[in-house]
């Protein structure tokens, strides 16, 4: 006589595995979107090209190219329950604005975004796991 419920148990394990893959992917996608959104929000004031910086320690919008260039790459699977995405500017001068160059003052926009999002990631991950796995 065979064991009863084995196929149902295997099906339940397969569902948990699939749901865990989905949760892992969603967490990375949501985290990348959070960093992207915060980095884009870290621009303050604007001025015309070759005009002096306006106001505080955040970068200004000149053409809008740098802010628009902050993007997230598609989420890619890197292993079992493991995903990654990259977020950052694609303009060649994004790093120079963030860090400064040749003694010029930097106007950090990306690092502050990451620092702001870091403490929120755990709570977001827990809520995503709960929603996806229906815990």
Image (cartoon, rainbow, N blue to C red):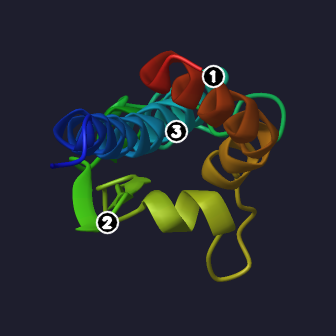
Q: CA distance from mark 2 to mark 3?
A: 19 Å
Alpha-carbon neighbours of circle 2 within 10 Å: few (<14), some, or many (≥20)? few
- On the rendered structure, is 122 left or right of 67? right
Q: Which residue is mark 2?
A: 80
Question: Which quadrant would residue 113 be assigned to in this image?
Answer: top right
Say which label, 2 or 3, has the lower sequence index: 3
Nearer the viewer's eye, disc 2 or disc 3? 2
Q: Earlier in the sequence, mark 1 or mark 2?
A: 2
Residue at the (66%, 31%) spot, across then down:
126
Q: Would you name the residue on which mark 3 appears?
A: 31
On screen, 21 above or below 19? below
Residue appearing at x 70%, y 52% in the figure: 108
Q: Judging from the image, what secondary structure is the residue with disc 2 in?
A: loop
Give me the C-alpha separation between circle 1 and circle 2: 21 Å
Q: Which residue is mark 1?
A: 127
Q: Measure how far apart labels 1 and 3 are at the Cα level.
A: 12 Å
Residue 54 or residue 78, whichever sits in front: 78
């Amino acid at each position: 006589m065979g064991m009863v419920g084995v196929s149902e148990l295997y099906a339940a394990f397969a569902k948990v595995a699939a749901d865990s893959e989905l949760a892992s992917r969603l967490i990375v996608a949501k985290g990348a979107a959070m960093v992207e959104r915060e980095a884009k929000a870290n621009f303050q004031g604007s001025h015309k090209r070759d005009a002096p910086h306006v106001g505080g320690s955040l970068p200004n919008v000149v053409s809008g190219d740098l802010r628009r260039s902050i993007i997230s790459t598609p989420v890619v699977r890197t292993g079992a329950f493991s995903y990654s995405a990259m977020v950052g500017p694609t303009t060649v001068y994004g790093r120079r604005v963030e860090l400064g160059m040749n003694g010029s003052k930097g106007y950090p926009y990306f690092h502050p975004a990451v620092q702001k999002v870091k403490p929120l990631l755990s709570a977001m991950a827990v809520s995503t796991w709960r929603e996806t796995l229906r815990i």
